[in-house]
Image: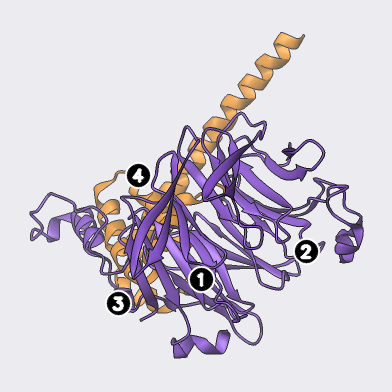
Chain colours: A purple, B orange
Amino acid sequence: MAAVAVHQFAECITCHAWSPDQSMVALCPNNNEVHIYMLSQDKWEKIHTLQKHDQIISGIDWSARSNRIVTVSHDRNSYVWNLEEAVWEPTLVILRLNRAALCVQWSPKENKFAVGSGAKTVCICYYEQENNWWVSKLIRKKHNSSVTGVAWHPNNILLATTSTDGKCRVFSTFIKGVDRRDSVMGSSADAKFGEQIVQLDLSFCWAFGVKWSPSGNSLAYVGHNSTIYFVDDVGPSPLAQNVAFRDLPLRDVLFVSERMAIGVGFDCNPMVFASDESGIWCFVRFLDERKTISSSKYGSQFSEAFGKLYGQSKHGVTNDAVEPSRSRGGIHENCINCIVPLNKAGNSRRTRFSTSGLDGKVVIWDLENQEDLSIYL
Amino acid sequence: MAGREEFVEADNAEAIITRIEHKSRKIESLLKQALMAIKDVDAMFNYLDPEYYDILMKYLYRGLSTGDRPTCDQCLRIHEKLTERAGLGCIVRALADTVNTV
């Protein structure tokens, strides 16, 4: 089995993040609180509740080295939480937004974080020592709609964003006094803060969940039209591929290696995408085996709905009660909207990751024993 | 002067709308003929490149929008077969695309 652990934490989970040693998980149970659970003797125990936000928390990220948690919420604010004597102390970050904050991510060096928002802007926040607070710098007037996803390039400067205007953009986030010039490589060396490096106009509808490959050479994002986009050589002349698939749209994506990516979304089952020797990406299979048998047929709810649609010939369907999106035979029973990598200590390979979704489960997956996929790792 | 120009423009717009309506009626009747000409749905799929599945789906929904009983029956027949082959993703793409409509 690809899934190594399943735990039901709540009715519904909007997002989750792991502590640096992966002994704790922080998640938002679809309200204004963050719950931190710790694994002790095979049981998950709630050890902290972070209460400060007024509305649903839409993004959590836990920094790996500095052990800080950043949260963003629909209340337009962000907090950075520091653990001081067993208590998580919040620091308010004023984002200067007039719409909800939607997503957040720490930069690789953990000296900045990026927030995407419904105000068509991206906030780059950094710590100012002399004033002892987090400052928010805005990238304005570049997005035509809400920013649904942000992803940091490994070089700590480039930031990729996706938006509901269907575009994926890459910006420079160079901040004087925070970043050094020598850390920037290649053509983006002279880019100022907020300068757009490239705009990818591949999708005609909402785009979600952008991620970079481990090397930062390529990126992937998903469209709401059941299509995933892979872009190589991100820069002045990018090479883009569209992969349309036969199932419901995705919400988020994660690279596990340069040649393999996992997509999660409305189909309740992670999808594996891989590129062959020539660099052509294609759909490989569903990760949750039980689904592969039934992938040529639809789940109960769909066949029932279609039965009605196709009508006259099929009088057998008399039950009018349409089941909710359950009993599809997979581990997740509803839309998966979050996928997070899990790195085992001393293991550079990213074979483990966790997913959470609207069914309130956190599932840990391991690709180690998936023989057919090992060639792509 | 300005008022007159606006009037001319409005007149133009009306003409354009009439032309579009005329064209869409023409497309509709062509579509009906084309769809009705398909007798053996399975045979049609055997020589249709999967690349065109998304486009066929869009035309099926266009056909359904006519509300004409025989056309809709035919569209649903093809729709069932097409969904078996191309999956729900094909329907999502047909509905989501607001730029390349038919």
What distance separates the C-alpha of mark 1 from that of mark 3?
17 Å
The residue that appears at 66% across and 33% down in the rendered structure is A94
Separation of residues labelled 3 and 2 (CA atoms): 39 Å
Name the mark nearer the viewer: 4 or 3: 3
Q: State whether residue A99 is above or below residue A364.
A: above
Using the numbered discs, state the Cα–Cα distance from disc 2 to disc 4 in whole angstroms: 54 Å
The circle on residue B29 is none
Left or right: A91, with A57 as reference point: right
Mark 4, residue position: B66
Q: Chain of mark 1?
A: A
Q: Residue at the spot x=57%, y=33% of the render?
A: A76
Residue A141 point in image, percent of width and height: 73, 36
Name the quadrant of the C terminus of chain A. bottom right
Q: Write down the residue under mark 3.
A: A290
Q: Amino acid at mark 2?
A: Asn
Nearest-to-viewer mark from 1 and 4: 1
Q: Secondary structure at mark 2?
A: loop
For residue A262, the mark is 1
Same-chain check, marks 2 and 4? no
Q: Is circle 1 on the same chain as circle 4?
A: no
Q: Which dot, 1 or 2, sits closer to the camera?
A: 2
How far apart marks 4 and 3 lie (CA) works out to 40 Å
Q: Give the secondary structure at mark 4.
A: loop
Which tag, 3 or 2, sits closer to the chain's start?
2
Name the amino acid type tagged 1: Ile
State the mark number for residue A155. Answer: 2
Report the chain holding disc 2. A
Q: Which one is nearer the viewer's eye here, A141 or B63?
A: A141
Picture quarter with the N terminus of chain A: bottom left
Q: Looking at numbered disc 4 in the image, what kind of residue is underneath it?
A: Thr
